[in-house]
Image (cartoon, grey):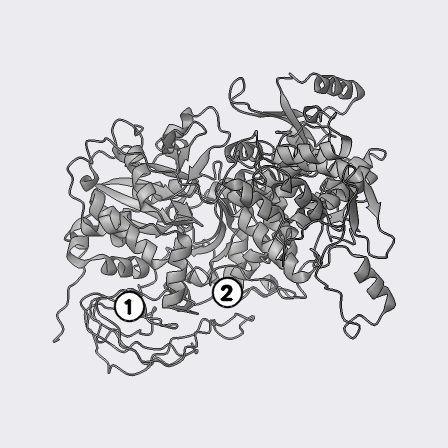
Amino acid sequence: MARAQRPVSRSATDIPQNTFMLDNGAFTIKAGFAPTENVSNAENLQSCEVIPNHIVRSRERKTYVAAQSDKITQWSEAVFRRPIENGQLVSWEAEKEIWENSLFDPKTASKKALVQDPADTTLVFAESPNTIPTLQKNADEIIMEEWGFGGYMRVAGPSLNAYNDLHPVFEDAGAPKAQSSLANLPMECLLVIDSGYSCTTVTPCFQGQPMQRAIRRLDIGGKHLTNLLKETISIRHFDLHQDTKIVNDIKEDVAFVSRDPKADLEAVWKGNKAKHYPPSAGTADIDGRPTELRIDYVLPDGVNLTRGYSRPHDSSKEAERKRKLALSQPETNEIVMTLGNERFVTPEVLFNPADIGSKQPGLADCVIQSLAKLPPLVQATMVANTIVVGGNANIPGFVERLQNELRARVKVEWPVRVRKMEDPITSTWLGGARLACNHRDILQKHAVTKAQYDENGSSWLARHFATAH
Amino acid sequence: MPLIEELPVTAPVKASAGWAYVPDTAPLPSQAPSNRNDRKRAAASTIRHGVNTTAKREKAIERRLESLNKENYKDGVHVPIPPSNRERDKGRKVTSNVRRILGYQRNFAHYLADEEGRNPGATHYALPAVATGTMAPPEKMATMQKSTSKDLGRRKSGRGRDVTTDEGSAPHAPQPQSRGPKRRQSVKSRISISEVNSSPASAGTPVAQKTTTPQVKTEESQSEHPQSQDIFMMDAASIPEPTTVPKAQPDYPPAWDDDLLLRSSTYDIPPMPTDRVMQLLVSEPPLTYNAARATQLDKDKRPPPRHFCGICGYWGRVKCKKCGEFTCGTMECWKAHEDYWILNCLMLGYGATQMCSELKEQAELDTNTWRLGSAEGLQPTALWSSVPSRSANSILGIAYRIVEFSRGKLVTSSTASTTYSYKNVNASHYFRTARDYIHYETSSLQGGICDLSLLADSVVNAALGSSHNPHKT
């Protein structure tokens, strides 16, 4: 053969044993070392550090990087800078600062996330699917050249979830345990719905590999829900346009997905005071009170109250009288607002983006679009093994509502199971940690060493990650 | 949602002598709607180029969606990275690549535009060219057809590095692919890849069509720019063997699986796709960012649009004829909407954006002077709800005062077209539009508009005389 070839030798250079799993999300970074032996999920998660992925400038014009922002007490009028836009890592200037602060600086990094010696560590870097190749290349180059990790693997985040211990999640408690040989493998067919800060991605995975043609994305995520809630509250109650973090807290505290939004809208409409409409059956349990969906939310003022809280709304007569009394005294130290339909109409947008005028389909239809690209048996298996990860999975009622909607759209003979892990936010990280621990051979096949990168360059690297399966 | 935007203004109208030139935008009789009712309705709507037109509505929706995508309430805020005093960073050598990447001041839109510019209309991100290979005319992907014969245009190329013979090749997953023997093929022959269809009865499996226009282009060996159009390059070596899944050993004779009683008469399980097909599915290159977005459903599948009351959030049962916003129908919400509409009228008449831009240079974004937030930041219901607005001196409070004033002095003309005329008690002028009135008021201020609260005060003073105390409002 005339052409000189450079064989990609994997056996010559092994990646370092110590593995650091990094799930670079738009809202938070999940980082930590993978365990060396098989441990339980709870123990595994103890080594995961959740770091906010932002640089904040507070109202007092003081700048906080990443986890330093936990010290902020007055969140009003804080300005955020995020290196990740639309799910893709755009600004390495900011991200480098955040990483240095949270991962490499012994003074500011937490013990769990501190990488003492990058040359002796393998980095497993999870990114979002369908990243622009230029951005991937930038990431590769910076990671290899700036910090010089000994081993490096860049992988699409959702596919890592296949390495989680999912049989207990999907099977009922009474089902017999799977045989050990099967249990060690990644989940064969898994549909991962990653609903995070910037967007919601539907990724069907086969044996831990994403099926690229069927990955679909909805440009609605936690950020849009927060902004929508901000707008709604600003029109009806208080102007909170500048208080993103406060509205985010409100969303995380009180928002829920209703099983029957029509019934719930009737229940909270002021025009229905004469006729009493009970809220739809599952949502009543969220507050503990069977008939009242409305809550009173007390806003923080940064001085006396640093974090808002909610309490159930009391619509009785003496509460009404108390409220009127409080209004007449302007020095009330409480800023309260009553939230009714905002609680469940805001997350409705995920299932029905047409409510705000968007042309995108709802989440269930997006899943159907994604599945339509797959063979029918694979479709059936995917729909029976669906897992929701990401921050939005924490919204009460989200998973059940999605299951109901999918059930209505899918053939009646196919079982539909939509589940989530106990902590959907760290679920991808957990999958990556288990990959590094239990499936060392797969890691060895995909990852590259610094020596290989130095020898072959970043375009070889991009090609390797795109093709090596 | 309140829509604030600047209406096209041909010339500022000077208030004098009780008349003013107003552009004549009445429709020509030939173009007028033939139906008499339509004409009456058109004439009755005060906002001629109102918010109800589809193009405006589309723009409003677009703008709203974009505002939902924002990180901060203001676009131009820049959070500078604090300088680091770390020992790590002192005296370290930074490679040129890193320095270049760190210096990028681009945001996502730039990268996306770049990518689109490179490969307009591509659906997949092609594999990057290997740096040391020589040119090879990129192979075009024919449509995938099912091939049962084993003698496809098979090529196995060198392991990853060899670009000359590095055309895509057909995957042959079932055969144990030995990485040893490499066959070279002629450079220009086409490839065909087996289709996704599984064997016999396909239950309507969609076939991935990768039709590309035949285009032979030399690729730069150094650049990593993918070729134009859909170029799908795969090495045979990159298609791995299917990972063998250890099958569970059944503890009954396998013949029992085919028992007649187990066959369902109503439902047949779809056929199992072959290993080759599955391997193909996982080895494809990723879609582009835009191609991966979920597309709008077909017209007949879309759910009917739902509207909500703009004031309280219940179903929007009543549609306002003038501005097209929905209300739930209760008197409370309807009155609130009417007030808001008058406000909208006023503001549009003056051009709220123009007003704000004049003030922006001078006013600070301080809660004491004014606060607008996003374009949708006008909160009309705060004007009349019992919940106090955060800043009573904000533009809302001022607007509230203007509205109050205008309501007291509202005089509708006798013609069919309801233009609002404002009577200034002191000057006894009639103004054709609210804009003229505000111009009149503000022209008396020193140096034009310097503070909206001054504007409001002057307006209210003009209405109620100087005995009025503005701070009591």
Q: Is residue B374 left or right of residue B248?
A: right
The residue tagged 1 is: B176
Which chain is home to disc 1?
Answer: B
Where is A266 relative to A68, above or below?
A: below
Q: Residues within 10 Å of mark 1 (few under 14, many from 20)?
A: few
Where is B364 relative to B224, above or below?
A: above
Residue type beneath disc 2: Lys
Which residue occupies the foreground of this view, A111 or A427?
A111
Q: Residue at x 79, y 70 (%)?
A: B32
Which chain is home to disc 2?
Answer: A
Residue B458 percent across, percent down from the top left: 68, 34
Which residue occupies the foreground of this view, B83 or A464?
B83
The residue tagged 2 is: A373
Residue B37 shows in this picture:
yes
Q: Is residue A331 left or right of residue A16?
A: right
Residue A30 percent across, percent down from the top left: 38, 38
Mark 2 lies on a secondary structure that is loop
Residue B312 percent across, percent down from the top left: 73, 39
Q: Quadrant of residue A249?
A: top right
